[in-house]
Image (tube, rainbow, N blue to C red):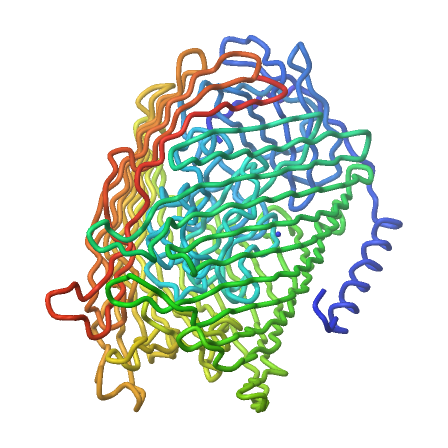
Amino acid sequence: MLGILEGRGSKSVSRLNSRIRIAAATVCLVLGALSAHGQTAPSSLTGVVEDPSGAVIAGARVEFTSGNYHAAAQTNSVGKFQLEIAAASGVISARAAGFLPFHLAWNHEPQLKIVLHPQFESDYASHHVLVTANRINTALEDSPADSVTISHDDLASTPALALDDVLREVPGFTLFRRSSSRTGNPGTQGVSMRGVGASGASRALVLVDDIPLNDPFGGWVYWDRVVRESISDVEVVRGGGDASLYGSTAMGGVIQFRTREPEQTAISAETSWGSENTPELSLFAGTRLGPWYGSASTDLFRTNGYIPVPESQRGAVDSPANSRHELTTVELGRHFGSFSRFFARGSYFDEGRHNGTVIQLNTTQVGDFATGWNYETKNVGAISARLFGLFESYHQTFSSVVSDRSSESLTDDQHVPSQALGGSAQWSRSVGRMQTLVAGFEMREVHGSSNDDLFKKTVPNGTTLSGGHERTERVFGEDILQLGPKLIANLSLGYDHWSDFAARLITIQSGVATLTPYADRTSNALNPRASLLYHLGHGTSLTASGYRAFRAPTLNELYRNFRQGNTLTEGNPALVAERLTGVEAGVRQSLLSDRLSLRTTFFWNDITHAVVNVTINNTTNPILAEKENVDRTLSTGVNLDGEFRVSSALQFSGGYQFAHAVVSGYTPNPAVAGINPSLVGNWIAEVPHQQFTLQARYVNPKIVTATVQGTFVGQQFDNDQNTLLLKKFFTVDLYLGRSLGHGVEIFAAAENAFNQRYYTALTPVPNPPPGTPQTVPSLGAPILARIGLRYEFPGH
């Protein structure tokens, strides 16, 4: 029988932990046994893809997904396709250039007729399939998570060049500082969402194909470690509800980059040149040969940058803040029938930055690998296993700058080597038609140290070596229940075990070494989540969630010191883990025949033992600060998101976040009491209370693609004492592209098109001479205008 279905939307530790070896071996044995005994005969699905007029669509991509099982095909010249499926149920999706993606549950129909509608004619978001929120495929309309998706096509028509700047279109997404990763120091690139803040380390987990991208030592994110042209889509889940499934670091949310797997020979490339002598190249190439597939991708970037100090305050030491990076990734995989897949991936990343003066610079080299196995049958369910590792070398120099900025002297030459090794396994299975179960475990071990050669007025002043080992182990489970035709419940529970061990401080002064060992420590956390989604009907749904979350301090926060301008912030080996309790509730609406979608989410996040950079002495040179656990911080607010499709080509979207993020409890350290008796009521540093984005996009492949995007960031404070105010600003980004045919597009883009000048940091000047400024500001990036070419094979 012919089923006619029509849809309208749619990343070696020195000591290999024996438990990781045992777990990895166990997973391999289980999977081997399953491969031998659990295979089921695949069924064949055939069909045709057409547009609403009945004309066939050649070259459309048709996919089937069920848990970790995946099959794909491309329609031939007469619009027909064939898939071999070995799963009890799943989701069929299809897409083609100029049409809305199609997503629908598959119920064993042997033949399908898929009708694709013109782009923007209906609500893609309401039919999109999420993976990150529940760790399995879930239709967006059936997930209570506050999620935002960015497709490959969205990325291609976004004015921003760096991935973190792309994500700034998501209301509530911020980095530790306002600066872009194009010129900002790596230690400023941790993520904050929902106003929970970041202390350099990210309070949101960033993944690439289920593998952590967060730096294992510092917790920040190297946004240029993902080849942009290799990205299939991006999922952003706001809030700490997924911490029960993803553990430490997911306190503020989860960001997932999913990369492309070639179904045939494919090439995707973008190259551009821009102001400040900014060339870039991003390239993805892949092919498939029988059951084997392979891909290689590279990302090359350089910019001469700009001088961040305002011209009126510049001195001889000031130089451009600039950066360059090179990234190469290679992947090889093999499908075993239609029920199993194995892949291995490796990459090498090299980055260099100048941080605004002659002496201050940093470099990073990262080599990493990942390997994985996916397996799925009707009887067993879906099983996935991952093993990954990383080797990193980080180097940074710090200096002291005199008040008139006429000279500087080296204070610290810092080398930070680190290694990480981790693994995970997950099982999921549908139980009847009303329930899905998920269970798994993860573990990771990190070893790193900060090795500092210290100087005083350019004269060597001793050496310190500080560091240790961290190990995290966790198990989790989830139960997704369809309690009725309108009500869906999601219950999950995670248990985390964190240990900090073999840590020490070695101080070498005048040739004499002093060893200070730190006591081994452990911490455990139980993180539950309960979520409900209720479909009221008429395009309206209600959501509610309550959850706990956990974040362990990073080795960087425990053992590394760093300097920002004339402020020296020291690590603190006595830091304990943070705990978050969160509640959120929202309403979603789809109106005007799905052309208008609205979403409102209220949130309340209470963090105990939050890690904050606390000022210890603001009269010394340098000013001294330390990472401390404050008693409590509280962030309450609302997210508003909206999207309106005026026609098949024109779309408007926007979002707003209000987050009242403050220190709600603080017991002063005796060393701080004389300076700052209380931080209670102060805004959390680097968190703006208001943000909004606006975007208009026109897409007509036969004429032009145009995007106008505005971003507003409200005022925020640059320090814990709330004495350094960074004022609000608004920027506009522009994109204009034109297809030349045969897969070639020419484009022009501008970030901060009207060259808005705003501050990203304020550096206090200790004991400034009379009549001179008391702070030295750092400017945000000026306009970046660029022109470029994009190439896709096969062409659209």
Task: Give the total of numbered labels.
Answer: 0
Q: Is residue 544 visible?
A: no
Residue at the spot x=49%, y=12% of the render? Answer: 740
In front of the other: 424 or 673: 673
Residue at the spot x=72%, y=64% of the render? Answer: 12
Q: Quadrant of residue 119?
A: top left
In front of the other: 388 or 527: 388
Residue at the spot x=57%, y=85% of the render? Answer: 506
Q: Is residue 32 left or right of residue 188?
A: right
In front of the other: 73 or 568: 568
Residue at the spot x=41%, y=44% of the render? Answer: 167
Q: Is residue 581 left or right of residue 249?
A: left
Q: Is residue 554 visible?
A: yes
Outermost residue on the right side: it is 36
The vertical placement of 559 against 11, above or below, is below
Please state the horizontal and vertical placement of residue 254, each as a whole percent of the image.
48, 54
Q: Quadrant of the N terminus?
A: top right
Please state the horizontal and vertical placement of residue 472, each as a whole percent of the image.
60, 71
The vertical placement of 628 against 31, above or below, is below
Outermost residue on the left side: it is 771
Q: Quadrant of the C terminus?
A: top right
Please state the horizontal and vertical placement of residue 147, each as a whole percent of the image.
43, 47
Q: Is residue 347 left or right of residue 689?
A: right
Please state the horizontal and vertical placement of residue 683, each as a whole percent of the image.
24, 67
Q: Is residue 115 left or right of residue 405?
A: right
